[in-house]
Amino acid sequence: TGGKGIGTGALTFKPIPPNTLDTFVVPNGYDHAVLIRWGDPVVPGAPAFDLRRQTAAAQARQFGYNNDFVGVLPLDKGGKRALLVVNHEYTNEELMFPGFTSHEALTVEQVKVAMAAHGMSVVEIERVAGTGQWRVAGSGRRPYNRRVDALSSTLELTGPVAGSSLVKTAADPKGRRVVGTLNNCAGGVTPWGTVLSGEENFDQYFVGGDAAPAADKPRLARYGITTTARYRSGSRRWERVADRFDLAKHPNEANRHGWIVEIDPYDPDSRPRKHTALGRFKHEGANVIVARSGHVVVYMGDDERFDYLYKFVSDKKFMTGDSWVARKHNLTLLESGTLYVAQLGQTSAAEIDGSGTLPSDGAFNGGGRWIKLVSGNRSYVDGMSAAEVLTFTRLAGDQVGATKMDRPEDVEPSLHTGKVYVALTNNTNRGVGSNPKPDEANPRTANRHGQILELVEDRTDHTAETFTWSLPIVCGDPADPSTYFAGYDKTRVSPISCPDNVAFDATGNLWISTDGNALGSNDGLFATATEGPERGHLKQFLTVPRGAETCGPFVTGDNRSLFVAVQHPGEITGATVDNPASTWPDGDYAKPGVVVTWRLDGGPVGS
Ligand code: FEO
Ligand code: CA
Ligand code: CA
Ligand code: CA
């Protein structure tokens, strides 16, 4: 692809057809290998995995469950050693514990295993010489390897909410130290070599909302925690192990989750931090770009139907170079800044009928503005303090009239073009009953397949408070007239449904992974150029096994290796570890795992 324009690289692989196979499928000319799977040893001294004798102490040293975000950070200049950083979003107890019947019937030790299977892993990996394949580094020294979990890891709160009355608990009267990170979904690698991880559906871990103080209930409810019953059926019941999960006893504990976590994988002794300046919601992920001014800008989505799109602009400026001084400075960039929420305007309001038919101006597009919520310790939302806006950010967004989106998941700026891409997964409630009606950015009633939104900051300045946007891709079966692929010939594109995570390769092509394919085939990974004549020529690159979601995607800087996380293989109603719906990857029962894919001839992936 050398010599071509940025983001225009032709993707020459032959797309693979949709399928429902219980295997991992890549195009001709490619190979793949499982790099690491649930239960593999991470921390030195980890015992071999034993399904029937699993303990929390073992799990706390082994690779966790339901790998989601994947980042690969170099350890050397030659591209031979790297750190793999992975999120473990949640657990499927029915696929983990033989004989599972209900959460109530799990032993206390099994609940602890599940808590230890959450969180994050850092694993040193090494390249297989001469190829794009990577493997877990040999059993010698692995000084960087670590696990962070929901059972016993301590994280530090930073920013305006740290130390406030909203996050003080009996166990942490100063409001600065939190045990555990919950539901770590997507994330991003920062320009200073750390990883950001989004705490997403943290509501599912708490009980006792019905007995919480009356003033707290609307706030709990806005975040999905039931306030009319002690817990919902199917609740994880972690309060049986740790009473911090019981809001009747510790109503502030929920306020200590739902943040962006920053972990420094190069410093294994560092305490991961929850940055309150970035707001609290169901964070899908967070991706950073350095603005021309030097301020760092973080784009974020709140993955719930009718929730919002956000950005954060740091107070301080990014310091370049590899010096210790620069790194120490950059590690403070996310502790203070300005948080905005997006309001999207439209150009064709009268014409949006929910059918997906393009408006008469030929595009779903419009302008928009970033509404300031908080700057430093100053609130811009009436009746809410800065700490309240940051802790109950959804309520602040409601109050200022932010645009209700179709599940904004991964939000990622292209470092090549500066354009920001938003995966809007789906929203089957759009326009249904009394729910918000379709608008130009969310144009389909009962939206099953989702869309991709492209956002361009005014003056291409990432600190700007205004922008324009358009929908380059409206997903679904290309034969469905409500789909759109940037005007590309729809007979030549792959069907895609439920875009979830996005990434860019070194050429600037956009890679899109899916979660919940409503077309009935397995989830997978797709790629398209973002600029030039190939824009919208979306092609399917891989599929994951039955019941799995495709997460992670990460392409190495040399374009030779592509990583994806296979999350929740075999997660199909009624399936159990005793009666699995998937036997990937080892032929016995399903295990989430991270896969590396490479081109057999050593060439760049995709091209
Ligand atoms: Fe954890 Fe929104 O996916
Ligand atoms: Ca329009
Ligand atoms: Ca996801
Ligand atoms: Ca991403």
Image (cartoon, grey):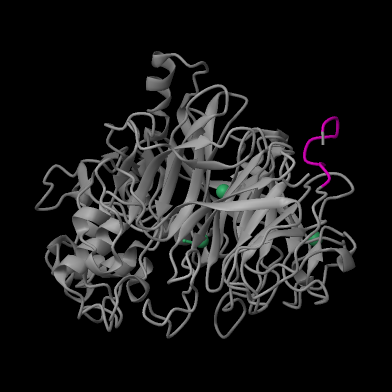
Determine the image quadrant of residue 44.
top left
Magenta segment includes 532: no
**Residue drawn at 65 percent across, 68 percent down:** 450
For the magenta stretch, what is the residue range? 2-10
Q: Position of residue 324 (x, y in %)?
A: 39, 15
* Closer-to-camera residue (445/41): 41
User: Does 505 sit above or below residue 446?
Assistant: above
Determine the image quadrant of residue 360.
bottom right
Residue 187 visible in image:
no
User: Does 105 sit above or below residue 262?
Assistant: below
Q: Identify the image quadrant of the C terminus.
A: top right
Q: Position of residue 459 (x, y in %)?
A: 72, 34
Determine the image quadrant of residue 465.
top right
Tell whether 246 sits left or right of 281.
left
**Residue drawn at 21 percent across, 75 percent down:** 106
Tell whether 57 sits left or right of 543.
left
Tell whether 231 sits left or right of 295.
left
User: Does 97 sit above or below residue 3?
Assistant: below
The main secondary structure of the magenta stretch is loop
User: Does 106 sit above or below residue 171?
Assistant: below
* Closer-to-camera residue (59/174): 59
* Closer-to-camera residue (586/251): 586
Q: Position of residue 237 (x, y in %)?
A: 22, 72
Residue 97 visible in image:
yes
**Residue drawn at 43 percent across, 64 percent down:** 591
Tell whether 185 sits left or right of 53.
right
Q: Position of residue 74 (x, y in %)?
A: 51, 30
